[in-house]
Image (tube, rainbow, N blue to C red):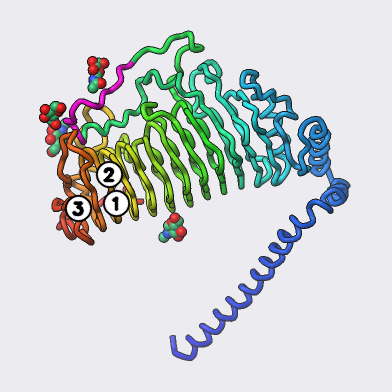
């Protein structure tokens, strides 16, 4: 291409870009204008506006029906200022903690679902007993708000879960849903914690630290009595689960005593969780705080998580995860994995965990993968993690196994670009444990500002351990991590195309 024809080519492109950008600018302005007018005029003009629209067609009639229903209801109980609010008390909820309010919640949802930006009210100080329930949204309007100021409590028997459900409360296929308020969601988990069904995962991190001095005792498996409403289903439900949703927010509320995981996001894009807390006992089995799976663009901050398993667990299919200002403990720490179980492919990338305080947790920050998996974990930053009395503050375990023995396999989920900076505080067993795969060593593992001290002499203390771990010691670590191999492995197994992410 000659110089002049290149110049005119560039000019054409430039003009094209200018025309295009001015066009998009106009649509943006127009859209912004509409959004801008909406809130200011909503109170004064909404009524007349709605009448006007209702003349239009069938869709409008349905909408107006649901609206007038809500406003006639709101004369009975605490009147609400907004036209588009749906108080569960107006749908027959008793809120006495013993009557089954499931139907009322379903009714409120059916009405709210039809109205964009509507609000469901779960008022304080009421306590609503609600069975397994699904707030399903493929045909619901966007931006619905669930205002939880009261308590929602799960049944304290197994009957309503039938042969087993993955969750107690499910929100599915929604756009822009927000759960907010100062209320509590209580999973009545204690009946579920007394027994471990055979397929329960068991977080057997004890193997890494054995032999400890017998202070950790595995509870023996007791059988649950039939008096608690039948046999325990083989699946323990997650308390609150979001599936296949966009732009989800959970804020203000507390989730406690879940049978299993407290809050789970599955196949979601755009998740925001803040000013949020989880509370369940340290010895409640498998009670993760927040569980992420196949989800992208997730922000979690300003949360207090205390539970019996991982405070936050990041599973396959997650990327662009940003977690900061979290208090974790008791619990098992913040984990990526276990990934690659049963020879599956796992992909996790771009995870930042920073400004976290962990007290009395099993692990601090951990990445765990099963032998035999494929795929990769890439681009992980753990920064400013303050640990106190944490058994194992820094862990990479590519030999994760929750059974007593797992087969040795050569394929592995590849780990690279893992940075630890300013990990400080006290540990009770071993400061650093890096166990990477022989065939797929961990690469680009960087340590900067590691300062970990043993808390006391009660336990047998271990030195930092590394196996097949390559990277850089950006600044001297306390204690020294001399086992980290500086640089890159001379040769490393290369994954087949179908195994890369
Ligand atoms: C562990 O459990 C066994 C049997 O239940 C019990 O005898 C023992 O005292 C326990 N040890 C500790 C340290 O709790
Ligand atoms: C990584 O994730 C953050 C959010 O935590 C996002 O802002 C950033 O754009 C992502 N980076 C890449 C390369 O996708
Ligand atoms: C797996 O490999 C490790 C290390 O090479 C070895 O100590 C162990 O015995 C092997 N386990 C099995 C089940 O082959
Ligand atoms: C376990 O504790 C006992 C007494 O408390 C001590 O004598 C022993 O050396 C400890 N064992 C280990 C492995 O730390």
Mark 3–mark 1 CB contact (< 8 Å): no
Q: In this view, does 77 lie above or below 301?
A: above
For this rendering, which residue is in front, 98 or 310? Answer: 98
Graded by Cα atoms within 10 Å as few (under 14), some (14 to 19) or many (20 or more), the crowding at tag 1 reads many
CA–CA distance between discs 3 and 1?
A: 10 Å
Q: State the mark number for residue 423.
A: 1
- The residue at the point 26 percent across, 44 percent down is 426
Q: Is residue 79 above or below residue 295?
A: above
Mark 2–mark 1 CB contact (< 8 Å): yes
Find numbered disc 2 in the image and state the secondary structure of the residue it sits on: strand
- Res. 407 image quadrant: top left
Q: State the mark number for residue 393.
A: 2
Q: Where is residue 299 in the image (x, y as percent from the top left)?
A: 48, 50
The quarter of the image that holds ligand 4 is top left
Q: Which span is picked out in magenta?
A: 209-221
Q: Closer to the observer: label 3 or label 2?
A: 3
In terms of sequence position, does the residue under pointer 3 or pointer 2 come before the other? 2
- Res. 342 image quadrant: top left
Quadrant housing the N terminus:
bottom left
From the image, tell me which residue sits under label 3. Answer: 478
Find numbered disc 3 in the image and state the secondary structure of the residue it sits on: loop
Magenta residues: mostly which secondary structure? loop
CA–CA distance between discs 2 and 1?
A: 8 Å
């Amino acid at each position: 291409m000659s110089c002049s024809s290149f110049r005119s080519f560039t000019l054409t492109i430039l003009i094209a870009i200018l025309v295009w950008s001015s066009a998009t600018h106009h649509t943006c302005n127009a859209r912004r204008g509409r959004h801008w007018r909406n809130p200011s005029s909503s109170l004064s003009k909404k009524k007349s506006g709605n009448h006007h629209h209702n003349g239009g067609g069938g869709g409008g009639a349905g909408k107006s029906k649901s609206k007038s229903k809500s406003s006639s209801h709101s004369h009975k109980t605490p009147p609400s200022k907004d036209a588009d609010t749906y108080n569960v008390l107006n749908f027959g909820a008793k809120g006495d903690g013993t009557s089954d309010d499931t139907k009322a919640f379903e009714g409120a949802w059916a009405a709210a679902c039809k109205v964009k930006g509507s609000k469901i009210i779960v008022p304080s100080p009421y306590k609503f007993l609600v069975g397994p329930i699904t707030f399903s949204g493929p045909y619901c309007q966007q931006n619905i708000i669930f205002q939880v100021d009261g308590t929602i409590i799960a049944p304290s028997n197994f009957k309503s879960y039938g042969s087993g459900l993955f969750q107690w409360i499910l929100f599915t296929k929604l756009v822009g849903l927000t759960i907010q308020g100062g209320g509590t969601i209580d999973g009545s988990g204690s009946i579920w914690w007394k027994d471990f069904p055979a397929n329960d995962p068991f977080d057997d991190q004890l193997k890494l630290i054995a032999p400890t001095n017998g202070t950790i005792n595995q509870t023996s498996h007791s059988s649950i009595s039939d008096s608690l409403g039948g046999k325990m289903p083989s699946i323990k439900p997650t308390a609150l689960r979001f599936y296949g949703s966009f732009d989800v927010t959970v804020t203000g509320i507390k989730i406690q005593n879940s049978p299993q995981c407290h809050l789970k996001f599955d196949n979601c894009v755009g998740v925001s969780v803040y000013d949020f807390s989880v509370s369940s006992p340290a010895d409640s089995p498998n009670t993760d705080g927040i569980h992420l799976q196949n989800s992208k663009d997730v922000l979690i901050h300003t949360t207090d998580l205390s539970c019996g398993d991982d405070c936050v667990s990041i599973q396959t299919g997650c990327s662009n995860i940003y977690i900061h200002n979290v208090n974790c403990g008791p619990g098992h720490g913040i984990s990526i994995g276990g990934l690659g179980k049963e020879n599956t492919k796992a992909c996790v990338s771009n995870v930042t965990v920073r400004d976290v305080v962990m007290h009395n947790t099993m692990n601090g920050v951990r990445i765990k993968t099963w032998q035999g998996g494929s795929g990769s974990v890439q681009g992980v930053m753990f920064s400013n993690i303050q640990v106190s009395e944490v058994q194992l503050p820094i862990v990479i375990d590519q030999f994760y196994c929750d059974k007593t023995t797992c087969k040795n396999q050569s394929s592995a989920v590849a780990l690279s670009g893992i940075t630890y900076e300013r990990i400080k505080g006290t540990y009770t067993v071993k400061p650093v444990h890096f166990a990477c795969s022989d065939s797929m060593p961990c690469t680009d593992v960087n340590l900067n500002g590691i300062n970990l001290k043993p808390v006391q002499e009660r336990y047998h203390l271990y030195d930092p351990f590394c196996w097949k771990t390559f990277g850089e010691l950006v600044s001297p670590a306390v204690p020294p991590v001399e086992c980290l191999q500086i640089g890159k492995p001379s040769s490393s197994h290369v994954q087949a195309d179908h195994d890369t992410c």
